[in-house]
Amino acid sequence: MSANDPFARLPEAASFTVTSTTVTDGTAWPPEQFSGIFGVPGGKDVSPQLSWSGAPHGTRSYAVTVYDPDAPTGSGFWHWAVADIPATVTELPEGASDDTGSGLPAGAFQLPNDARAARFVGAAPPAGHGPHRYFIVVHALDVESIGVAADATPAVLGFTMAGHILGRAVLTATAETAA
């Protein structure tokens, strides 16, 4: 695992709380959150359940991202990005991210991840590469719509959000594939 801190060069933001019935902060993903798309045995690419509270005053929408900074790509790997979650929503059910986003609230949409699928793609660290961290982040934003195209990348979402983030709630999962 690298010391890469994906928040080190981002603007400071207030913190609030995110929890999950799927995974506990600092623990390994369950098998369902591993990648079936990338052929991990038992992997089902099921997005985690998330609940959040305590967002800063003035929050007008949320975005959710899942990012692995330890992927051997030089730029990490974006597993999931959801934009324009209404400020009245404070939970996503497990499995919200199917191919159609049927479990997402009205108005929210998924951007293509680094596998170019507009859905959650589970953990798939290369065998023997060591443990990977998966930063599950709920971003509280000061705009109702972040204004990115549905086919934008998660990096474009992050760049566009940078000046609109009021708060950030972070939960970290881990995964490792034996050599």
Image (cartoon, rainbow, N blue to C red):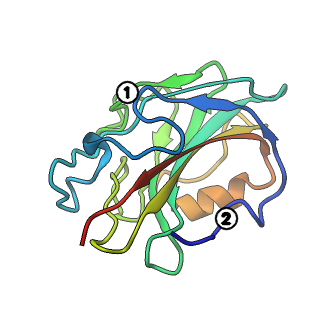
The image position of residue 124, as x and y in percent, is 31, 61
Q: Are there few (<14), some (14-19), or many (20+) residues within 10 Å of tag 2?
A: few
- Closer-to-camera residue (171/115): 171
**Measured along the vertical axis of the image, is residue 40 above or below residue 144?**
below
Does dot 1 land on a helix, a strand or a loop?
Answer: loop
Which of the 4 image quarters holds residue 137?
A: top right
Quarter of the C terminus within the rendering: bottom left
The image position of residue 94, as x and y in percent, is 37, 29
Q: Is residue 136 left or right of residue 158?
A: left
- Closer-to-camera residue (83/67): 67
> Whole-Å distance between the Cαs marked 1 and 2?
30 Å
Q: Earlier in the sequence, mark 1 or mark 2?
A: 2
Q: How many marks?
A: 2
Which of the 4 image quarters holds residue 51?
A: top right
What's the amino acid at mark 2?
Asp
The image position of residue 8, as x and y in percent, is 75, 64
User: Do the residues under discs 1 and 2 have CB atoms within 8 angstroms?
Assistant: no
Q: Are there few (<14), some (14-19), or many (20+) residues within 10 Å of tag 1?
A: some
Q: Look at mark 2 in the image and give the residue it sits on.
A: 5
What's the amino acid at mark 1?
Gly
Q: Residue furthest bottom?
A: 74
- Closer-to-camera residue (1/84): 1
Q: Look at mark 1 in the image and give the residue it sits on.
A: 103
Does dot 2 land on a helix, a strand or a loop?
Answer: loop
| Numbered circle sitting on residue 156 | none
Q: Residue furthest top?
A: 88
Q: Is residue 136 visible?
A: yes
Report the residue at 36% width, 74% height from top.
129
Q: Is residue 47 left or right of residue 31?
A: right
Judge depth for marks 1 and 2 and give the one in front: 2
The image position of residue 21, as x and y in percent, is 43, 25
